[in-house]
Amino acid sequence: MDKKDPESDTSALGCVFSGGWTLLSLPLWIAAFALLVVSTMWTSRLFAVALICLLPVPLNLLHWRRTSRKIAAGLLLVAGSSALLVCKQQAQKAPGTQEDAARLVHHENFSGLFGIANLVAEVDQFALRSYVMAATNPDLSWQRASDLRRITNDLYRDLSLDPQLSSLPSLLGSTYREMLGLKSSPGSLFTYIPSSSSSGEPGKKIAIVLLHGSLGNFQGSWLLWKKLADSTGVAIVAPTFATGKWSQERGREAIAQARDFCIQHPDIDEERLVLAGISEAGIGVLHEAAVAPREWEKLLLISPLIEQQTINSQPFIDGWRDRKAMIITGEQDTSAYGKSIRAAQVTMESFEMRLTTHHLPSGDPFLFLSEWSSVQKLIQPWLVKP
């Protein structure tokens, strides 16, 4: 009678483990090879190599009695761990100090600063995300996704030359945690306090509390708003909340943390706080404006998503009658979301809100990235005017 090979892995437990690990690791395999292909930074490629080396190691445990498998597993483990260690060393960036013009202010999840979002360069994260968004979002064409990659490549090239911003860690970890279904919580604040002064109380600055959209609180946007701050003297305070669903539980807590920072900062005029939101954050801006209208001087909405019921609510109408807001959007936007902006404009003007609206020729869903120079020129005079 033939004897069963003791080194075989045909046991039920082995089959379950092998099949289970293959299914669980498949998305990681796909992500690793995709990252290897689309990356422009060597650290991102090295992280992809680390994944490719480490993912097969558990399967080698099924053949551990074989010398060849031991050698292969050992080599893969050493190579993958070494690559991962190098990536981690490159990711050890400091959040800055109180003396720094640009810094991160921690409230929760400080360890998240050094998570996986810092092991892969943000420019390569966006390259990978652009393909995923084009494949899953019917409103984003492959051409628009290609344009997004081109814009972000240029943006992050400029950011790498800015010593104040390039030394800061990424805050996109919370964005990915929400994508995985984990509970959202307020993250760190990005703050930039320029040395120049803006109009207002002597020695005090106007501050923009900036709510990010679904792309997250990413470093590339910091560079754009820093340019606005340097040209106007306003302070930038950008809280972090996962994918920018600010009206959800704990979203207002993140906004409150940003406002408290402004109140406590000696160089910021707490009476001149502008609440701004991009894309999906428009819902959060209007919700916050309805709940606490007297805490904000103006509202700034860029390509916003808008919930009409918030604008129609009596607290919003009473709180913002004869007060200022600006909306910047694309002229070519004929989608339902574009129609909601036009409906909101009519409603705001009906109760005598002092609304300034600009429709740029572009219909780009990432208007603030592709048309930033035009957006900045529109914001500057409106921002500093009482």
Image: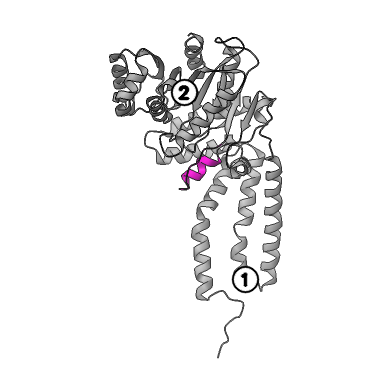
Residue nearest the viewer, comparing 1 with 171: 171
Looking at the rendered structure, the secondary structure element under dot 1 is helix
Task: Evaluate if marks 1 and 2 touch, with contact meaning CB atoms under 8 Å apart.
Answer: no
Looking at the rendered structure, the secondary structure element under dot 2 is strand
Left or right, residue 365 beside residue 92 = left
Q: Determine whether 195 is above or below 176 in the image.
A: above
From this viewpoint, is residue 194 visible? yes
Left or right, residue 355 beside residue 228 = left
184 within the magenta span: yes
Q: Amino acid at mark 1?
A: His
Magenta highlight range: 173-187
Where residue 145 appears, as percent x and y from the top left, is 46, 33
15 within the magenta span: no
Q: Residue at x 70, y 54 (%)?
A: 79
Give the labeled residue for mark 2.
276
From this viewpoint, is residue 371 visible? no
Where residue 327 appears, as percent x and y from the top left, is 40, 18
Give the labeled residue for mark 1.
63
Where residue 328 appears, as percent x and y from the top left, is 41, 18
Q: Residues within 10 Å of mark 2 (few under 14, many from 20)?
A: many
Q: Residue at x 33, y 24 (%)?
A: 315
Q: Amino acid at mark 2?
A: Ala
Earlier residue among tags 1 and 2: 1
Q: Residues within 10 Å of mark 1 (few under 14, many from 20)?
A: some
Q: Residue at x 63, y 13 (%)?
A: 196
**Which circle, 1 or 2, is nearer the viewer?**
2
Q: Determine whether 134 is above or below 102 in the image.
A: below
Where residue 335 appears, as percent x and y from the top left, is 32, 27
Q: Determine whether 260 is above or below 68 in the image.
A: above
